[in-house]
């Protein structure tokens, strides 16, 4: 059990290889400063109650920090409850292109996949 708790603390979410590639490309193309990391979070709203937050930001005192493939990732401590075990992926297909969120904590999701309830 202690191993599982430590793993959750060190990597509460998973970023797929495709997501990491796209995030690093975006950082380079948009000249994101090197002191910024990837912020993953939630906010109230969306058709199912919560919406995901994904962007680049500075770390705050409220954040837990971990690293995935050299990319610093920040999650506000209060948001971890909704995000633990989530996977962020990048899809590129005929009908859909962008980041998708596979969240085992979501009890319901909307059709667009960017909002959920827990």
Image (cartoon, grey):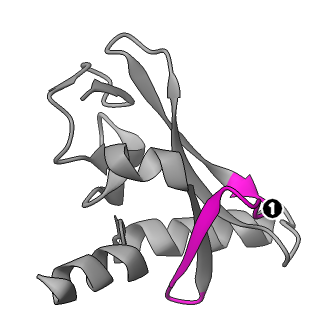
In the displayed structure image, the side of residue 22 where residue 61 appears, left or right: right
Residue 81 in percent (x, y) is at 34, 48
Q: Residue furthest top?
A: 47
Q: Relative to 102, does residue 16 appear above or below in the rendering?
A: below
Q: Nearer the viewer, residue 96 or 117?
A: 117
Whether residue 93 is visible, yes or no, is: no
Q: Which residue is drawn at the image coordinates 78% and 65% (left, top)?
A: 29
Question: Magenta stretch containing residue 36, yes or no?
Answer: no
Q: Which residue is drawn at the image coordinates 87% and 67% (left, top)?
A: 31
Q: Secondary structure at mark 1?
A: loop
Q: Nearer the viewer, residue 53 or 76?
A: 76
Where does the N terminus fall, quadrant-wise? bottom left
Tell me the quarter of the picture where residue 2 sits. bottom left
- Crowding at mark 1 (Cα within 10 Å: few <14, some 14-19, many 20+): some
Where does the C terminus fall, quadrant-wise? top left
Question: Magenta stretch containing residue 62, yes or no?
Answer: yes
Q: Relative to 113, does residue 26 appear above or below in the rendering?
A: below
Q: Nearer the viewer, residue 62 or 47?
A: 62
What residue would you read off at disc 1?
A: 58
Q: Relative to 16, does residue 85 appear above or below in the rendering?
A: above
Q: Nearer the viewer, residue 14 or 60?
A: 60
Residue 87 in percent (x, y) is at 29, 59
Q: Which residue is drawn at the image coordinates 63% and 61% (left, top)?
A: 63
Whether residue 2 is visible, yes or no, is: yes
In the displayed structure image, the side of residue 82 where residue 74 appears, left or right: right
Tell me the quarter of the picture where residue 49 sits. top left
Q: Which residues are magenta?
A: 56-70
């Amino acid at each position: 059990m202690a191993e599982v708790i430590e793993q959750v603390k060190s990597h509460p979410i998973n970023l797929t290889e495709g997501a990491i590639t796209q995030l690093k490309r975006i950082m380079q193309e948009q000249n994101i400063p090197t002191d910024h990391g990837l912020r993953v979070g939630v906010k109230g709203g969306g058709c199912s109650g919560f919406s995901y937050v994904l962007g680049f930001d500075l770390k705050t005192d409220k954040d837990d920090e971990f690293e995935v493939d050299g990319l610093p990732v920040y999650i506000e401590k209060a948001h971890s409850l909704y995000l633990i075990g989530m996977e962020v992926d990048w899809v590129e297909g005929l009908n859909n292109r962008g980041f998708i969120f596979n969240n085992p904590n979501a009890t319901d999701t909307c059709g667009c996949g960017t909002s959920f309830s827990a």
